[in-house]
Each structure stands twice: as structure tokens, then as C-alpha cells.
Image (cartoon, grey):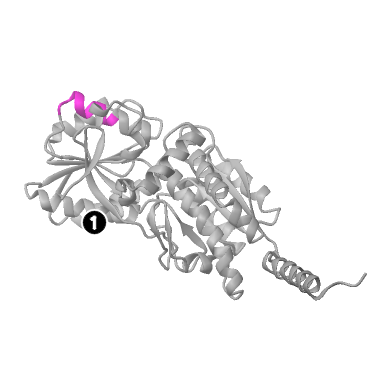
Amino acid sequence: MKLSKGVKKILVGCLMMSFLAACQFKKEKEDIINIACNLPMTGDVAIYGESVKNGYEMALDDLKDSLFKYNIKIQFDYQDNKCQNKEAVSIMQKQLLDNCDIYVSGITQQTLSIKEQIEKKNIPHIIWSFYPLILSEKENIIRTWVNLPGEPSLFKQYMENKKDVKRIACVYLNAASANDLFNRIFIPMIKDKYEVVYNESYEIENTNFKDVVLKIKKENPDMIFVNGYQNHIIQLAKEFNTNQMKKDGNIVFTFDLLDAMGYVEDEVLEGYIANIPSYVLDRSDEKKDWYRRYKMKYNRLPTYTDAYAYDCASAIYHAIRTKRQNEQLSLKDAILSLRFEGVTGNVSFGKNGNMESKSIMCVVKDGALIPIK
């Protein structure tokens, strides 16, 4: 059958369109990234492991169309170290028998127990650690959590603005991160101008702070700085209230106060001061939608750890695509080169692997965080 010129043109046009479509949707080579996670999923600090996992999974769910389009597969292996160093080491030894492209560990003590072995593998090591002195430009460590190393400067500035502060007290969890925060950074920073009348740590098992607070009260400090996990923060706040020690912004918590908000009556935290990641104050529709979707998915409000984990997983995705454009880049260098807008604000990294994030001093008022000007 002889085809007319018009029909031939249509067929040729269809073939060309099919060819172009095939070229357009031709998949790139598949990248499979295996990520081994060594985190506390049960026990007193299980909320951290749970939040990291939730943040990672929600990010991958939101990125699923892009992951498919660019032929990227990100696979997580979650193992529970129960916040025990021995468990962390055992898990690490088993996980390293399989090839992994990125290692994730937390929290501080467990990370410190395996850090050297992971470094020998020469792969990015994403740490969920509050330890401010763990970072080094020479290592493959990447830290995507709140900016704890920046807290002492904010505390110092807050004291200076109060003008009448002379005597201070510090009470904090007996952990490497908190000990270094107070004893190697904060107190040396302010000791020439302020008298430290109380400087004590407590054990993670402590749930009764009556004696601790009474000792602090006896010293009559002008300002008190407090650190701890969620249950510690709540009990300390209640004990300060019971002893009527809160007055005119004189009790300052580390960012851990965020963990307590929503888990205790608003009046318990009323009037307390805390260093807060700036993104928490973002009331944009986009951020509100993210909070709403998270709550629908996990039946609770997201913590700051959920938000930072979400951005961490997004950073891994962006780094994979960046590395495709420049095969000479290591995966760590690809991550450090990133600049993108995330849930926690503008995501970028310093040369030492620390995610650069801003924070601000706030006061709790009627269950809300109000910036201190």
C-alpha cells in the first residue's frame, strides 16, 4: 500500500518524537548508596535514634520522584546500640563486614568508641553527637546537628546584656559533650569576669534533683546555666519552680529545652531562657506544612533532631548528584560543597564538617518561644 506524503510526514514525526522521548527519559547510571546506622533505638535516649530514622525516611519519601528520575537508591541499615559503647562496637564490627558508603553513629559516647575504626575506612562518618571538640578538617566526620559549639558565646553575650550578673552556677549531664562545653569552652571564656560558685555534673540515671537545686540555691548565684536530656530538663525546671528560684531570666537552658516543650505543662517552662535554633521560629507556610505532614506521618510533633535528620538525608541526595558532575570529588567533599534551602534554613557546612546553623536566645512565654532583643 502506497502511503501519501502527508501520512509519511506524520509517521516520521511520530518516530522522531519517540526517539526524543526515549533520549529524554533515558535513565542515568544507577547509584546505590548503602548507609550503616549505629544509633540508640531503645532505652533512655531512644528519642534521638527514632528521630534520626524518622527524619531520614521522611526525606526519602519526599524525594522519591527525584530518586527515581535520577536513578539513585539510598539504603539504610538501622541497628540499635542501646546507648551502650560495647553494643556500638559490636554493631560496627558487623556492619563493616559489608561494604557501606556512609557510616552514621550516635550519640556522643558511642561515636567516640568507634570513631577511629570508622576513620580507617575512609568513608564519610555522619555523627549525631553534641561533643563540640570532635570535629577536624583532617577527618571524614560530618556533623548535622544543632550548633552546640556556638552556645557559649551566646550565653556570654546574654550575661553581659544583663549587666548585674556576677556569680553563676552550672549544672549539666556527666557526658563528654557537656563536660567540654562547660569546662573547656564556657567557663574558661568567662572566668576572668564572673565567679563560678557552683559547677557540678550529674549522672544520666538521676531523676531526683532536689538536693542539687538546694545546693545551688544555697550559693545564691545571679544566673544558672542548665544542660540535660528531656527528663532531666523537666525535673530540674520543676525543682527550680518549687524552690522559687526563677526570676527575671536568671535560669538559662541549653537547646535541650526544646525536647521538653510539648511534653510538660506550659507553666512549668514559663519564663525560662534557652538557646534555640533560628529555624524553629520560622512561621512560613512551607515550614508549617512540613510540621503538619510530619505529625500526620508519625503522630507526634517533630523535634529539632527530626528536622536536622531530614536535611541530612537531603544533603546526601544532593551530594550524590553533585558528585556525578565531578567524579573527582569525594562524597564528603561533595557534601561540604553544598548550599541549599532545607527545613532548618540555609544548609551549608564548614571545612571541619560542621553544619553551619544560626541560633538565638529566647524566653518561653505562654508555651511559645519569644526572641530576646
Instruction: Give left or right: position of 357 versus 114.
Output: left
Majority secondary structure in the magenta region: helix
Q: Of helix, strand and loop, which one carries label 1?
A: helix
Q: Nearer the viewer, residue 95 or 48?
A: 48
Few, some or many residues within 10 Å of mark 1 (<14, 14–19, 20+) = some
**In this view, 82 is above or below 207:** below
Where's residue 357, x and y in %? 35, 57
Residue 70 is inside the magenta segment: no
Q: Residue, x 29% and y 51% (percent of image)? A: 183
Q: Residue, x 42% and y 68% (percent of image)? A: 351
Please tell me in which quadrant of the rendered image residue 2 appears: bottom right
Residue 199 visible, this orientation = no
Q: Which residue is mark 1?
A: 153
| Residue extending farthest right | 1
Kind of residue sitting beneath label 1: Ser
Instruction: Give left or right: position of 357 versus 35.
Output: left
Q: Residue, x 64% and y 59% (percent of image)? A: 69
| Residue extending farthest top | 242
Q: Residue, x 77% and y 70% (percent of image)? A: 15
Instruction: Give left or right: position of 327 versus 233.
Output: right
Extent of the magenta region:
236-244
Where's residue 14, x and y in %? 75, 68
Where's residue 264, x and y in %? 32, 27
- In the picture, the quarter occupied by the N terminus is bottom right
Residue 241 is inside the magenta segment: yes
